[in-house]
Image (tube, rainbow, N blue to C red):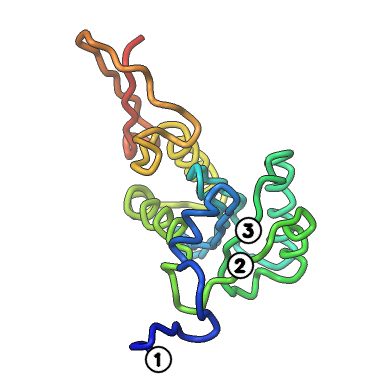
Amino acid sequence: MKKAGIDPAPRRAGPTWSEFLRAQAEGILACDFFHCDTVLFKRLYCLVVMEISTRRVHVLGVTEHPTGPWVAQQARNLMIELGDRAQGFRFLIRDRDTKFTTMVDEVFTAEGIRILKSPPCAPRANAFVERWIGGLRRELLDRILIVNARHLRCVLAAYETYFNEHRPHRSLGQAAPLRALPDPVEDDIKVIRHDRLGGLIHEYAQVA
């Protein structure tokens, strides 16, 4: 079958997954859970959603006991935050975690968003969010001691602001999701540094 050019079932023809993501990026949301262990040996779970086209991230919540109703409430909060922009999304990529119940899916399907479940043990199927979580761990969570859920929420809020408003993205031409690149200047420029989270993260900006 491989020599004859016949793809494995159930897909016999059509675009690959990467081709689909590139073609439909403006209408795709991707979500995933990640965990963080505190210094008091408690495990906290965090839910994050990314808008694929702009790379904008929404950290929806932190909890010690993630349940279906809790996830559904975070999904409702996201729909409220998106407002009219929610109509522009057609797909939601998620894994097959049991915390994503029918109640959670109905929040999205009510807005006309189709649920796409990634295959088991296939992190590359949700690579954008997985890459963000990996960067969060390397740049922040591996370098700071988290005390409790309140502390983690504050830390994640600061990182979310940094990621959405300052961090450059190669896919966006080195712009940030919520901030375009400044106009180039010919004269020598001065740069100032702003530290976040006690200096774990540095932001650089041109002096006006």
**Residue drawn at the location 33% of the way across and 88% of the way down:** 3
Q: Earlier in the sequence, mark 3 or mark 2?
A: 3
Q: Measured along the vertical axis of the image, is residue 11 above or below residue 52?
A: below
Q: Are marks 3 and 1 in contact (CB under 8 Å)?
A: no
Q: Which residue is mark 2?
A: 116
Mark 3 secondary-structure assignment: strand
Asked if the residue at tag 1 contacts the one at tag 2, i.e. Cβ–Cβ closer than 8 Å, the answer is no
Give the residue number, with chain letter if any, for mark 1. 1
- The kind of residue tagged 1 is Met
Query: How far apart in space, not on screen, are marks 3 and 1 (Cα)?
Result: 31 Å
Residue contact at pointers 3 and 2, CB within 8 angstroms: yes
Secondary structure under the numbered disc 2 in the rendered image? strand
Question: What is the x, y in percent for residue 25?
Answer: 52, 51
Type of amino acid at the residue the image marks with label 3 = Phe
In this rendering, which labeled residue sits more in front, label 3 or label 1?
1
> Whole-percent x and y of residue 74?
69, 53
Q: Can you identify the residue that label 3 sits on?
A: 91
- The quarter of the image holding the C terminus is top left
Q: Residue furthest left?
A: 188
- Amino acid carrying mark 2 in the image: Leu
Q: Residue at x 61, y 67 (%)?
A: 116
Q: Which quadrant of the figure has residue 45? A: bottom right
Residue 29 percent location from the top left of the image: 58, 54
- Where's the N terminus, which quadrant? bottom left
Find residue 47 and report its horizontal and vertical position in percent: 57, 57
Residue drawn where x is 33% and y is 21% of the image: 205
